[in-house]
């Protein structure tokens, strides 16, 4: 059976930037729904992370739905791990790579926010790495995952309306700016350190 990660902190941990009710609904209703859907579509056959690149192994008629729901689980797993009550900055090799690529963390953050503001419709902004360790900031629509493009997602911000609407309504840019008070790069730093 496919599963989602346990929320790494209490529902209220991201207050006042993301309210407790939003986190509760987002995790228990939205995130869990992707898991329920995927388990209805397929019995456990391969690790979740392998689905995007091995989607041809599933029946043609189910591929779109399987990919969508697997992406929904993976993207939300990473989103929760990209946030924390106390923000943390990138460390080690990831910090070096960010400095090399963007000059410094503040400039990286600015470019990430700009990218987020440019997303049309529902989706995510990701920090990804290719197999050579080159990092970039990309937008993906709906529940598309960078894994489909041989890119490893390291960090992400969910830009679907359900991620911010209760508190920010139509002011998506305010959410995009405020969320950086709660961003956590421990997971991204560890992942990058393990890969390179
Ligand atoms: Mn979401």
Image (tube, helix red, strand yellow):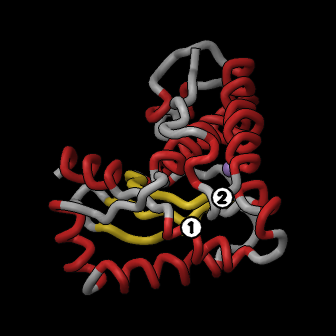
User: Pointers 2 and 1 in contact (CB under 8 A)?
Assistant: yes
Where in the figure is residue 13, as x and y percent of width and height?
A: 56, 48
Where in the figure is residue 105, as x and y percent of width and height?
A: 31, 78
Image quadrant for the N terminus?
top right
Sequence-earlier tag: 2 or 1: 2
- Front residue of 122/151: it is 122
In the rendering, which numbered label is found on residue 18?
2
Identify the residue at image location x=33%, y=60%: 129
Q: Which residue is mark 1?
A: 179
For label 1, the SS is: helix
Tell me the quarter of the picture where residue 28 sits. top right
Report the Cα–Cα distance between label 2 and label 1: 8 Å
115 relative to 95 in the view: left or right: right
Label 1 neighbourhood size at 10 Å, few (<14), some (14-19), many (20+)?
some
169 relative to 147 in the view: left or right: right
Tell me the quarter of the picture where residue 108 sits. bottom left
Residue 63 visible somewhere in the drawing: no
18 relative to 80 in the view: left or right: right
Where in the figure is residue 47, as x and y percent of width and height?
A: 45, 25
Label 2 neighbourhood size at 10 Å, few (<14), some (14-19), many (20+)?
many
- Front residue of 175/191: it is 175
- Front residue of 120/183: it is 183
């Amino acid at each position: 059976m496919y599963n989602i990660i346990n929320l790494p902190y209490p529902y209220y941990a991201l207050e006042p930037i993301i309210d407790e009710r939003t986190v509760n609904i987002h995790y228990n209703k939205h995130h869990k729904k992707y898991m329920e859907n995927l388990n209805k579509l397929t019995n456990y056959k391969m690790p979740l992370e392998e689905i995007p690149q091995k989607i041809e192994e599933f029946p043609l008629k189910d591929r779109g739905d399987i990919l969508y729901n697997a992406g929904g689980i993976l993207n939300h797993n990473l989103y929760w791990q990209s946030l924390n009550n106390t923000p943390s900055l990138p460390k080690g090799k990831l910090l070096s790579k960010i400095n090399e690529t963007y000059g410094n963390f503040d400039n990286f953050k600015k470019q990430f926010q700009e990218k987020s503001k440019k997303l049309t419709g529902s989706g995510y902004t990701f920090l990804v790495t290719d197999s050579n360790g080159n990092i970039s900031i990309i937008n993906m629509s709906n529940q598309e995952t960078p894994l489909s493009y041989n890119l490893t997602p390291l960090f992400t911000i969910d830009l679907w309306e359900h991620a911010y609407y209760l508190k920010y309504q139509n002011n998506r840019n305010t959410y995009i700016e405020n969320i950086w008070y709660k961003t956590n790069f421990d997971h991204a730093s560890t992942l990058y350190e393990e890969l390179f």
